[in-house]
Image (cartoon, helix red, strand yellow):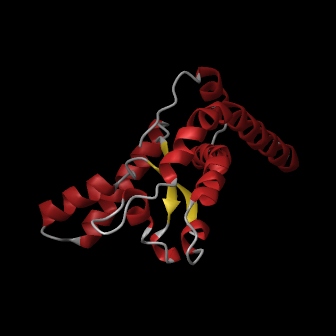
Amino acid sequence: MKMKVEGLKELQASLDQIAKRSTQTAVMRRALTKAAEPMRAKAEALAPIRTGDLSEGIKISTRTVGEVGAAAYSRTMRATGGDKGASVAAMRDARREARASGVNPPVQLFMGPTVGSGSFYGVFQEFGTRNHAPDPFMRPAWETEAKATVDRIAPMLRAEIDKAVARAAKRAAKNGN
């Protein structure tokens, strides 16, 4: 499921006050993770308990959309017949261009059972199999918490922006700027 939050122009303007793009991305990741925590807790509470691996394995993670440079890397790999050195250089150049353009990539949030946690069977619980009826836990958590999660994003993003701006100001004062 995808959800896109738009119309937060004032927050975007505040976010643009933060000079480093990596700090902007970190601010967005922290705010999204905090906003989604109650939904994760709800899914954990609704998860069927057999061994406990499923509920304990429900995690929140984030990533930036369209990891910058990946397309340049693969394009160069195809064009050069697998020259890894040239492909890595193309990826670095694409990332430098993206940083120089000042465009901050959007951040995606993922939530659910992680494969490495021993809860690989979460999808079977959620949707069922030929021999097992569905026992959903993610969908009900989404349905009860989606609106509240979206409503939490703006204030949490504002708080994270304020903290990042305060840290940057403190650092600048310490360095005598």
Q: Is residue 175 above or below residue 83?
A: above
> Residue 66, how many percent across, how many down?
37, 48
Left or right for 67, reference 79: right
> Residue 162, how many percent across, how many down?
77, 36
Which quarter of the rendered picture does the C terminus lie within? Answer: top right
The residue lying at 26 percent from left, 65 percent from top is: 86
148 and 132: which is toward the camera: 132
* Number of marks present in the image shown: 0
The residue lying at 63 percent from left, 52 percent from top is: 42
Quarter-wise, where is residue 90 in the image? bottom left
Left or right for 55, reference 161: left
> Residue 38, how many percent across, how many down?
67, 48
108 and 104: which is toward the camera: 108
Which quarter of the rendered picture does the N terminus lie within? Answer: top left
The residue lying at 32 percent from left, 65 percent from top is: 88
Left or right for 37, reference 120: right
Quarter-wise, where is residue 163 in the image? top right
The residue lying at 28 percent from left, 60 percent from top is: 73
122 and 32: which is toward the camera: 122
> Residue 53, how many percent across, how many down?
56, 75
Instruction: Tell me if I can see residue 110 in this picture.
Output: no
Instruction: Tell me if I can see residue 150 in this picture.
Output: yes
Quarter-wise, where is residue 58 in the image? bottom right
131 and 118: which is toward the camera: 131
Left or right for 93, reference 53: left
Q: Is residue 169 above or below residue 112?
A: above
Q: Is residue 58 above or below residue 4?
A: below
